[in-house]
Image (cartoon, helix red, strand yellow):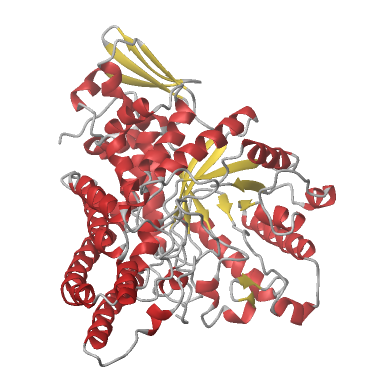
Amino acid sequence: MQYITIKSLDEKQNQALNEILPYIPSLDASLLDKVSFERSESFSLAKKEGNVVISYAKEHQIYRALSLLSGFVNSDADVLDQKKGYGLLCYMADMSRNAVYNMPSAKRMIRYLAMMGYDSLMLYTEDTFELPGYPYFGHMRGAFSKEELKEIDDYAFMFGIEVIPCIQTLAHLSTAIRWPGLAQFSDTPDILLVGHEKTYKFIKDMFEYCKEVFRSRRINIGMDEAHMLGRGNYTDKFGYEPKPDIMIKHLDKVVEIADEVGLAPMIWSDMFFRMAFNGAYRVREGEIAQDIIDRVPEKLTLIYWDYYSLDKQIFTHMVDCHLKFKNPIMFAGGAWKWYGFAPHNKFSLVSTELQLDVCEEKGLDNVIVTAWGDNGGECSQFSVLPSMLYYAERAYAADASEATLDVRCNECFGIGFDALMTMDDPNNLEGVGIQLGNPVNPSRYQLFNDPLEGLMDVHGNPESDPVYYAKAAEKLASLTDNKDFGYIFDTLAKLCVVLKSKCNLSIRIREAYKAGDKVTLSAIANEEIPALAIKLDNFLAAFRKQWYKENKTFGFGTQEIRIGGLRARLVSTADRLNAYLNGDIDVIEELEKPVLSFNGRQYKEGEVTYTRQMKWNENAAVGIL
């Protein structure tokens, strides 16, 4: 493609223009002959004397405008006015739960962010960056090198996007603390030892590294979910202190170090509230004591994170509580991709609508969209694009309806909104609705549910689930030809093929065993399980392809151990069934035990029993893993 130069853009902007043009599915490059750009207080596209003038308030808006250009030119409108966006519209990608961007994925995501109109990207890295002087930090975790981070920062900067480092300076450091060199200054296996000289040397080293690598002078320093703060080595070394005192003391010191290095820190706000509300974060009523508010360093930005709230009263109260601090406040919502292999865009959209309504009412316009990867990072990095796009359309457009999202999905991603939402389907079983405060994830827990122990047997519908998964597999398979997202649909389709047979396998085995139905048990052992093992192999191959396309190779070993363990259990189950059928054993002990709900609930007949279960080790077995 010929290099295009637009006189109204500078050299860097023209470079970014040529970099992104091949990836904007809706754009006819010939239109650029009649386009000019101008800095302005507003953001708009306007037709003037057969040409198009794009006015932009911030540099990153140039690339959103390009994704809108063809649609605007072909419309009857003379002007397309866009709001200037939020004060901050940031996407936070979780790089710490096994899945770490490879360079093509990082650049692909940055291009999508540019087309949608995001101004910043956070890379959540607990220990997934190489830190000089700490050879075990990020060891075998796919840690970004300094050169890789600089390349990501440079690429984003080309589009006017700020890359904000997002690290941890208190908790969530179990994968780092376990190693020599850091274990010596731990409070608990997950929390750094407050008050220790080496702790603050370590934190300062991280700050100086981030300052060297990134252009941004903002930094997210974490400090969330430090539930056991001061309850381990801290007490042995310093004696008992109340959590609020330990937290504030540590915060003062860390903010002082950040100021010394020249960084502007922000933290997740939950610990202040948990200490005030007996461990709870979101409450309907109650206030944080004014003396705690007064002790929070003024140079600190607080981030209210809430991925759950569907209750407007609770959400509004929590925003009001945050606004009583003297600190700058941001809101972090969720693009749900952390409950297994499939995303929860539907839940994300419903919860986000309520949350952004309140934020806009309250004048809170600094927004972070988080996409976590809890317990393994199994979900595709690009599975929550519909949710991310919703935030962008709320920021820029008067309309964020499904019709608008469909148009924008095609303009930015070359695929329709409904097609992308199909990625949710492995969890949208019959009777599953928007659950208050949490989605459910049967496609994950039914996959790893042990074929003999059946810990999750209560939480499904053994009659309708196989029918649903068969239809979902067919629908997902129909989308596998898409050039950019087909590999994701293929992974999810093959998952549903497995689940069609696997979802009620343990239930059917138990029923046949209790009924003395040896014909069925023999068919399961010698026909169904061998066929299921092949289907599982096919799923693993598709999942491996997806992983290597999007992520560094590190972390996939965990997936293979889990799925390989399931396969081994299937083979073992067939062996046990045949041993029983052959008279080698008199009973199958697991099948003699009572069936209990996983969550302790007693369900009424006809009640929807799907639940959420995220911890693989608890889902797969009761034994120690």
- Residue 147 location, x and y as percent? 38, 61
Residue 99 in sight in this render: no
The quadrant in which residue 118 appears is top left
- Residue extending farthest to the bottom is 584
Q: In this view, does 416 lie to the left or right of 154?
A: left
- Marker count (numbered): 0
28, 416: nearer the viewer: 416
Image height of 306 relative to 5, above or below: below
The quadrant in which residue 436 appears is top right
- Residue 117 location, x and y as percent? 41, 34
Image height of 162 relative to 337, above or below: above
252, 402: nearer the viewer: 402
Give the quarter of the figure containing the N terminus. Answer: top left
Residue at (37, 39) in percent of width and height: 386
Image height of 400 relative to 423, above or below: above
Residue at (67, 73) in percent of width and height: 193
The quadrant in which residue 504 appears is bottom left
61, 201: nearer the viewer: 61
Image height of 90 relative to 502, above or below: above
- Residue extending farthest to the top is 49
Residue at (62, 47) in percent of width and height: 303
Give the quarter of the figure containing the C terminus. Answer: bottom left
- Residue extending farthest to the right is 291
Residue at (30, 18) in percent of width and height: 72
Q: In this view, does 143 lie to the left or right of 493?
A: right
- Residue 548 location, x and y as percent? 26, 62
Residue 439 in sight in this render: yes
- Residue 307 location, x and y as percent? 54, 47
